[in-house]
């Protein structure tokens, strides 16, 4: 079973030489590049969004190594095996990641809407002789049960 992820989505689109002419899809592509540190040019090794570098490091330590969360105000400590971060840094990174998730949801809905608008325009261009359907206006009193 294939999981849905940014990497799987864009791998399929790259295989098909998809033209990224959809604004929602372009936005998702930029989030993917920040999230996975993908650079178009080898001169730029850091992602455009430096906060995503921190989030990527925290996720990596949570999944593969040790992440400890300290009290607010303590210093961040970083070794090969363990990463210790203060609670306020974890909070701010979590909120930032939630904002990115919200942005991705908005971009997906924008992508779908733009795609559906293009389909509708093609359909109307082919079938411009369809009869119009008129909606009748009803009094608000008639709409109650």
Image (cartoon, grey):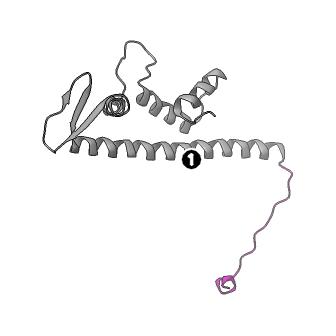
Q: Quadrant of residue 74?
A: top left
* Number of marks: 1
Q: Is residue 127 left or right of residue 64?
A: right
Name the residue: 82% across, 60% down: 132
Q: Quadrant of the C terminus?
A: bottom right
Q: Nearer the viewer, residue 68 or 7?
A: 68
Q: Is residue 64 left or right of residue 129?
A: left
Name the image quarter holding the N terminus: top right
Residue 142 lies within the magenta run: yes
Q: Which x, y percent locates residue 66?
A: 29, 31
Residue positioned 59% across, 29% down in the render: 20
Query: Magenta stretch: residue 118 in it?
Result: no
Query: Which of the 4 image quarters holds residue 68?
Result: top left
The local crowd at label 1, few if under 14, some if 14 to 19, many if 20 or more residues have their Cα within 10 Å, is few
Q: Residue at x 61, y 33 (%)?
A: 2
Return the x and y of residue 46 as percentages of the image width and height.
Answer: 34, 21
Report x, y in % for residue 53. Answer: 33, 29
Whether residue 60 sits left or right of residue 40 in the image: it is: left
Q: What residue is disc 1 on?
A: 109
Q: Is residue 3 above or below residue 71?
A: above
Q: Main secondary structure of the magenta part?
A: loop
Reply above or below: 5 against 132. Answer: above
- Asked which quadrant contains residue 142, the reply is bottom right
Residue at disc 1, secondary structure: helix
Tell me which segment is drawn in magenta: 128-144
């Amino acid at each position: 079973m294939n999981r849905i992820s940014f990497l799987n989505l864009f791998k399929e689109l790259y295989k098909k030489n998809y033209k990224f002419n959809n604004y929602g899809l372009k936005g998702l592509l930029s989030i993917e590049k920040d999230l996975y540190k993908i650079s178009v040019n080898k001169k730029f090794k850091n992602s455009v969004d430096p906060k995503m570098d921190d989030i990527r490091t925290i996720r990596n330590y949570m999944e593969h190594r040790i992440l400890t969360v300290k009290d607010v105000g303590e210093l961040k400590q970083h070794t090969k095996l363990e990463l210790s971060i203060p609670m306020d840094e974890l909070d701010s990174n979590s909120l930032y990641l939630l904002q990115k998730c919200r942005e991705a949801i908005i971009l997906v809905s924008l992508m779908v809407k733009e795609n559906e608008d293009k389909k509708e325009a093609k359909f109307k261009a082919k079938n411009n002789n369809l009869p119009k359907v008129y909606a009748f206006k009803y009094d608000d009193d008639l709409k109650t049960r």
